[in-house]
Image (spheres, helix red, strand yellow):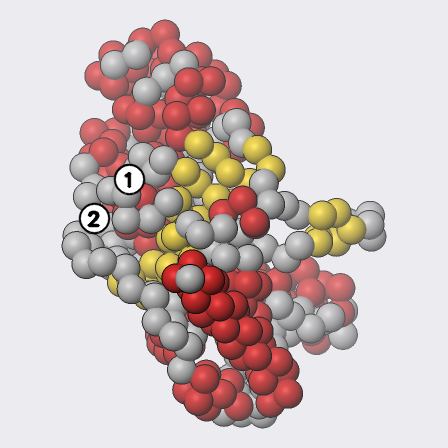
Amino acid sequence: MGVQISDIIPRKEIDIKDLKGKIVAIDAYNTLYQFLTTIRQPDGTPLMDKNGDITSHLSGLFYRNINLLQEGLKPVYVFDGIPPELKQAEIAKRKKAKQIAEQKYEEAKSKEDVAGMKKYSGRFVKITDKIIQQSKELLEALGIPVIQAPAEGESEAATLARAGKVYAAASQDYDALLYGTPFLVRNLTSPRRKKMPSGLYVDIKPELIEFQAVVRELEIDKDQLICLAILVGTDYNPGGVRGLGQKRALEIVQKYKYPVEIFKHVQAKFDFIFDWQEVFKQFHEYETSYKEDIQFKKPDEARVKQILTSHAFSESRIDSGLAKLKALDEAKKQKGLGDFF
């Protein structure tokens, strides 16, 4: 779910081409959820092979990354590790919500209510160990680097950006800002068009959020941004402080400035049961443990075909995608020769 501060965060629309030549660390779980919930059949059923294995994630990773690579972007996928203990309450909450959604889906299915099936089908998506392993295998076969984070993927992505190993973190959530990523990219792996409830389609463009622009416009610093997030609620303290919205929380942070003073004031006015200092530490003290250079490799075409054909992907479509990667590689070689001469 992530921290809910979208109403007050400045951002600007960009084109994918604006990220040409830049390495972007993508929050893998966030992206897999996106593919698993959006790449579906009309009744909400995910794409599956003849054995009943879900393939929506493989479709999304293959075709979307080819598009990103063609635009000159260099994607790196960062996978979650073991979630912090403080996140267990949020995990339990999500699990319960999934169970309810699955029950409602089954009720809709029993009534042959296609609209209801579609409505609830994406709400109980589970990222299994099998989906994670398949995703890593396909990405590596495509030559795209995979990084395993010790804990949260987006915290690792953000600190990789902060350390200068990548240009930006990419996620639909805003949490990466709390870890100090200099740039956050949203809608990077999203569909280019989205159907609205009215039936009309709207264009979806990538958004770039610059950390310095955020703190400058909000007139706060990084520690105050973390405090603001805690007040409205994070995955480590779901719900935040009851009665405080984004704008009121911002006013409090601006006025009292220092974390201790901020929460001293809030404790005198509001009731909450979480330990704000423990939540603060989760964002403030995280450092990347990844010390290696990020390496991009040439796609292993045979391996890509083996993975996708084993899940009944069309060989002609696979070949078409691989041909685009081959053309991209040839263009790089030609440019290299041109530069040499």
Label pair 2/1, CB-CB below 8 angstroms? yes
Which one is nearer the viewer's eye here, 249 or 322? 322
Total numbered labels placed on residues in the image: 2
Residue that numbered label 1 is attached to: 162
Compared to 262, does 126 lie above or below? below
How would you rate the neighbour count of disc 2 (Cα within 10 Å): few for under 14, some for 14-19, many for 20 or more? some
Residue at image position (21%, 48%) is: 288
Residue 311: where, in percent of width, then height? 53, 88
Residue at image position (23%, 33%) is: 284
Residue 72: where, in percent of width, then height? 50, 57
Going by the numbered disc 2, the residue's amino acid type is Thr
Q: Residue 71 sits in which quadrant? A: bottom right
Going by the numbered disc 1, the residue's amino acid type is Arg
Q: What is the CA distance from the residue labelled 2 to the residue labelled 1?
A: 9 Å
Q: Which label's residue is closer to the chain start, 2 or 1?
A: 1
Give the number of the disc on residue 288: 2
How would you rate the neighbour count of disc 1 (Cα within 10 Å): few for under 14, some for 14-19, many for 20 or more? many
Report whether residue 268 is seen. no
